[in-house]
């Protein structure tokens, strides 16, 4: 869960987080910043929500932000640069292997996801 520091009423809960640093685990929660966050688009959370989430995750220092779009069978990956801004690193549609730029060996086969 992430609170938007600019707008205190916005709280974001990612669909999926990849956490490698176990030191932030406390009972049933994680306090820290995951390496990767994935958001799965649905009709109820389309593009109007992406910009505020992306901005918040960028400010918190999430190294990679994946946007999964089941309607287009596509995945977009944005990677945090040295200047602490997201740069689109990759886009795949329907097939292929999406590989993380941050976590070596972490990859997702689009055919497995969008069957």
Image (cartoon, rainbow, N blue to C red):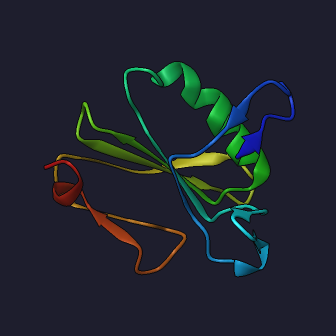
| Residue 85 place in picture, x, y as percent | 69, 47
Number of callouts in the render?
A: 0
Residue at coordinates 61% horizontally, 69% vertically from top-left?
19
Residue at coordinates 47% horizontally, 80% vertically from top-left?
104
In the image, is 95 to the left or to the right of 51?
left
Foreground pick, 16 / 95: 16
Residue at coordinates 77% horizontally, 79% vertically from top-left?
23
| Residue 11 position by quadrant | top right
| Residue 5 place in picture, x, y as percent | 86, 35
| Residue 70 position by quadrant | top left
| Residue 13 place in picture, x, y as percent | 62, 42
Q: Residue furthest front?
A: 27
Foreground pick, 78 / 2: 2
In the image, is 54 to the left or to the right of 99?
right
| Residue 69 place in picture, x, y as percent | 33, 37
Foreground pick, 78 / 28: 28
Residue at coordinates 57% horizontally, 25% vertically from top-left?
49
| 8 in relation to 17, above or below | above
| 45 in relation to 25, above or below | above
| 32 in relation to 60, above or below | below
In the image, is 63 to the left or to the right of 106?
right
């Amino acid at each position: 869960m992430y609170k938007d520091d600019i707008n205190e009423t916005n709280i974001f809960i990612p669909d999926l987080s990849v956490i490698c640093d176990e030191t932030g685990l406390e009972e049933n929660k994680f306090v820290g910043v995951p390496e990767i966050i994935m958001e799965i688009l649905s009709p109820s959370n389309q593009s109007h929500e992406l910009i505020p989430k992306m901005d918040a995750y960028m400010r918190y220092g999430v190294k990679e932000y994946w946007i999964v779009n089941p309607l287009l069978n596509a995945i977009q990956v944005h990677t945090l640069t040295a200047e602490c801004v997201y740069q689109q690193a990759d886009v795949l549609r329907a097939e292929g292997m999406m590989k993380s730029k941050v976590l070596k060996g972490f990859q997702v086969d689009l055919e497995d996801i969008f069957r």
